[in-house]
Amino acid sequence: MANQQPRTLVVTTNHFRILNLPTESFYQYNVSIKYKEERTPSKRIEKGVAREVFLTLQANEPQLFTPRAIYDGMSIAFSTNMHIHANTFEVVLGRTVFIVAISPVTTIQAADIQALVTPRNPQLPRGDNLAAITLLQHIVRQAPNLSVRPAVGQLLVNVDVSTVAVYQSGGLVELVMAFLDVSDARKMIEQMSHQRTFDSVSRFLKGLLLAKPKVNSPGNWTHGKKISGLVANAGQETFVDQNNVTLSVESYFAAKYNYQLRLPGCFGVKIGRTAVFPAEVCMVMPGQLYKKRLDEDQQRKFIQSATQKPSDRLHDIGQAVFGRNQVFNYNKADFLGKMRIQTEPEQVEGKLLPNTQLKFGRGQTKAIQYGKWNVVQYEYAEPKAITNFAVISFVPGSLNRDVKPFVKALLEVMRSRGVSLSKVDFNQVIMKECSPAQIKQELIKLYEELKATRKPEFILVVLPFSAADLKRTVKYWSNAMVGIPTQCVRDKKYNTQKGLKLDQYCNNVALKINAKIGGVNSMVSSSSLNLNNLSTMIVGCDVSHPGPGAQKPSVASLVASMDQEVTKYASFARVQTPRLEMILEIKEMFTDALKEHVSYHNRGKEPEKWVYPLQHIIVYRDGVSEGEYEKLRSEIAQIHECLRTYPSAKTPKLTFIVVTKRHHVRFFISDSLAKQDTNLKNNAPAGLVVDEGVVDDQYPNFFLLSHSGLQGTSCPSHYIVLENQYGIPKTE
């Protein structure tokens, strides 16, 4: 392994070279758009409305906006006209008057733009280059998933296609029926009579934009009107009109619009503070993104519908660039005429890393191929003995029919993987079947029963097929209340497998159980980092945030390896200011990790015989965007401060790497390679490293495909090295 060298592989990427840059200077302006008459409560102007206001302004003032300015829909505009002075304008859209204030900010010289492709010292700050890149981003960003990416000696446009979940357009009643999976409006009304369902639909619809309704309602509906809430039995909702007469919504619509409600008992929606519209007259504006979290079933269906073969994705990207509906339309875009973008995607040379060896039990080894492996026919590296466990099913009628046969098959697989079950008496194992409606009470009762026996190594929990809320309850009880590992399996998943598929499913479940109870499934035989000769700690850090609008803290987490084989980890967590990406207590968390590492390596020793072996720490930092890299210098400084307190002769060296997964860079192999090796599933192979052609020189960085693609196009992770005291080469 140590003597194997990476092989080269040429791949196509979804980047297109900018051949000609603008040769004029640009002027950046600050833009503020407000209502002339302030709304109460204050109402934020949507991006789409702001763009239309600015477009109307440019049409009204051609002497200032020829050629047209570029506007981002918020507060930034660029123009080649230097004579737009600070000024305010009135713009009328429909019945609404807006005040637009414009003021100059800075100048981006043509030389600043040309400097983007001039070789420079990467240690020097970018200076005005950031403003120039921002300008180019706005020039090309005429569709989602378009961005300008600096590379060594050139600029590239990254073009991607994506699938997003959108609300079903058309009638609002039909949308809610689809959401509740009913085919009859009366069933929808009956279900929504239950408060839980009504609240669920309210959350689903809140903030949705409605188009002009079926009746001729006054007002400007061009940009839609937002649902502020739901009203049950809307036809019977009453209000007092301008003549001080009390009317029901049903009678009002009959008198005002000559419209008889077909579903008088149906829900309605609130528009603004007081207006109520029956759902049956409401129409959903098309193309609205669904930004809320998809449930498990929705996620599965979405992935199935969104999956696209890599070759089809590359074809669609090509069509977006130079096809009939191309986004780079030089005839219609004023500023694109100043630029030329290559119509063929870039090809780059990557390195294909050698396969890594895995070590299993009894000295068995296996080379990883295609970034995946199968443990069948191998024993775990360190199987953990099981003396007692319990089973609880929340699927009525499943215990004897499905659960017990599955448990027997699972135990047989675990024996084959080397797990000792000699002290387990199957007939004495606690197995219960309970109602999911009483899940909290049943878990408490189970724990009371378990206290009378040996503490189980784990609990197998059988859940209904769609039961995300039940699983959260189980995991909270397991992790936060009783400290017993749980392994959940889903109905219609574990009990529909037969033959080899059942064996594979049991192997997958057994892998998780062995790891959760302290065993080790396999070890990496790695020569690249010389882990056998250098004591190294691998650390992962991330911050998870609450959902949009939720007033809850963010959670900073850190996991650190304890053993030389990098198979055992300790975890640490802190709560902090909501939506803050920087880890406030990184120093304290690292201090705890180092103490745990020292304790692990000195178990059973007298204090005077303690050793402090740590020589190197590799930190993988997740969840940080490109504009926040420099902010991480504070985290790095705190880690160094912590390492200086480590009681060894030499301070451990630090390697700090940011890992980004949410990007639009993709790599594609040739048709000939895809046909030659069908195991690749048309994807670039696992182990592909790309560190030339599409990477910037601001920081050492590279893209790595670490696993094989199962569906769609594989997404590489982007690794940005902010600190490398040990000097690890990129290919390692």
Image (cartoon, rainbow, N blue to C red):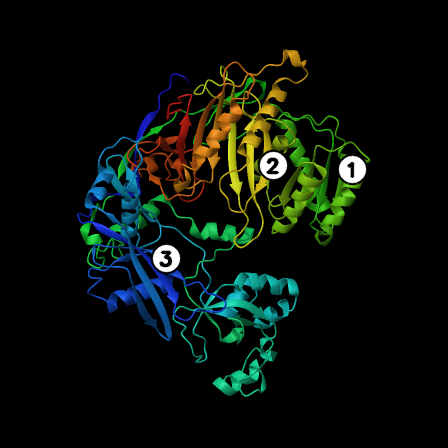
Between label 3 and label 1, give the one nearer the viewer.
Answer: 3
User: Mark 1 and mark 2: span between their CA atoms?
Assistant: 23 Å
Q: Residue furthest top?
A: 609
* Residue at 47% across, 49% down: 303
Q: Do the residues labelled 3 and 1 touch (CB within 8 Å)?
A: no
Q: Which of 693 and 325 is in front in this view?
A: 693
Q: In which quarter of the image is the C terminus?
A: top left
Q: In this view, does 594 lie above or below 175?
A: above
* Residue at 36% across, 32% down: 701
Q: Which amino acid does label 2 sit on?
A: Val
Residue carrying label 3: 74
Q: Which amino acid does label 1 sit on?
A: Leu
User: Mark 3 and mark 2: span between their CA atoms?
Assistant: 50 Å
Q: Nearer the viewer, residue 108 or 359?
A: 108
**The quarter of the displayed image where residue 342 is located:** top left
Q: Residue furthest front?
A: 86
Q: Which amino acid does label 3 sit on?
A: Met
- Residue 279 % position (x, y): 53, 73
Between label 1 and label 2, give the one nearer the viewer.
Answer: 1
N-terminal label among 3 and 1? 3
Q: In this view, does 103 lie above or below 700?
A: below
**The quarter of the displayed image where residue 699 is located:** top left
User: Mark 3 and mark 1: span between their CA atoms?
Assistant: 59 Å
Q: Is residue 359 visible?
A: yes
